[in-house]
Image (cartoon, helix red, strand yellow):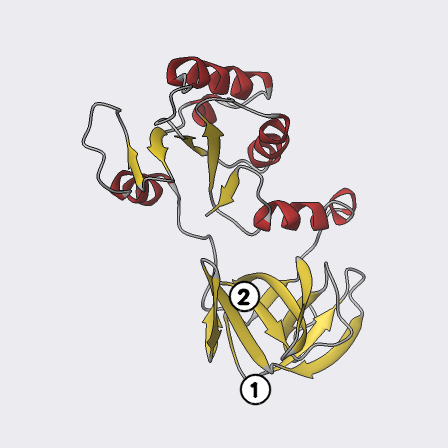
Amino acid sequence: MNMVEGVILVVCASEGPMPQTRFVLKKALARGLKPLVVVNKVDRDSARCDDVENEVFDLFCNLNATEEQLEYPILFGSAKSGWVVKNLSEPKENIKALLDAIVESVPPPNVDLTKAFSMLCSQTESNKFFGKMLIGRIASGKVKVGDKISSIDQDGKIVENAKVFKIIRRYGVHQMELESAVAGDIVSIAGIEKSTVTNTLNASGNNEIIPVRKKLIKKILIKFFLFFSPFPLIPL
């Protein structure tokens, strides 16, 4: 959750908020995010849009959402049919309303391109071609394939010095190799073998760390699981 600037909360028009909806929404609200709500499957015969809309609002209130967070945008759609609208009386043709709402409600990442490269590792993964990869959002600067970088643990100790072998970025379900990436990008970096979650990757020579609160270290894997899970929260 620390890698994103916004989320889409997807709720079924028939079933309404589920236990996992409460769990992931609580995490998003605690992070200070203002969710964009999409009531999905409104074309079902069992859809009860008005009731679900009220249930979602009650859930926000029960989770102590701020006044600003309670002013969330709400849209209605059918993922199966490929349309989203602000009002069910509108023509149901495409998802333009959702894309417009994302542009309007999600702020750009708060990053600095002028500083040296730094990135907090939020998760690791194994790639059958490139080996171990560290995943995170670049906090500052830029990085390119071949750059020398250092990995620093939360105590400020150097874990290893390495060279960037590959940079991968996800576009939907696809993965694309990049020659370089900049602050704000969420990427996977290969070439670092000993590092792990909560380590800070820096441009070589910089030993500063991106701090992680101790109580969050044990939860960071859970947060990343939410990022890629089928749970009804889509990070932006």
State which mark lies toward you, 1 or 2. 2
Provide residue 61's location: percent of width, then percent of height. Answer: 54, 17
Provide residue 53's location: percent of width, then percent of height. Answer: 42, 18
Provide residue 88's location: percent of width, then percent of height. Answer: 26, 24
Outermost residue toward the left in this view: 91
The residue tagged 1 is 146
**227 with respect to 105 (left or right):** right
Q: Mark 2 is on which residue type?
A: Val
The label number, if any, that marks residue 187 in the structure image: 2
Residue 209 shows in this picture: no
Place residue 162 in its image quadrant. bottom right
Outermost residue toward the bottom in this view: 146
Place residue 99 in its image quadrant. top left
**214 with respect to 59 (left or right):** right
Query: Is residue 156 placed above or below 24 in the rendered structure?
Result: below
Say which residue appears at 29% left-offset and 42% top-offset. 95
Q: Mark 1 is on which residue type?
A: Gly
Provide residue 221's location: percent of width, then percent of height. Answer: 71, 50
Nearer-the-camera pick, 226 or 93 = 93
Nearer-the-camera pick, 23 or 192 = 23
Q: Residues within 10 Å of mark 1 (few under 14, many from 20)?
A: some
Residue 161 shows in this picture: yes
Helix, strand or loop at mark 1: loop
**49 with respect to 168 (left or right):** left
How much space separates mark 1 and mark 2, taking CA atoms?
15 Å
Say which residue appears at 28% left-offset and 29% top-offset. 86
**233 with respect to 163 (left or right):** left
Give whichever of discs 1 and 2 has the lower sequence position: 1
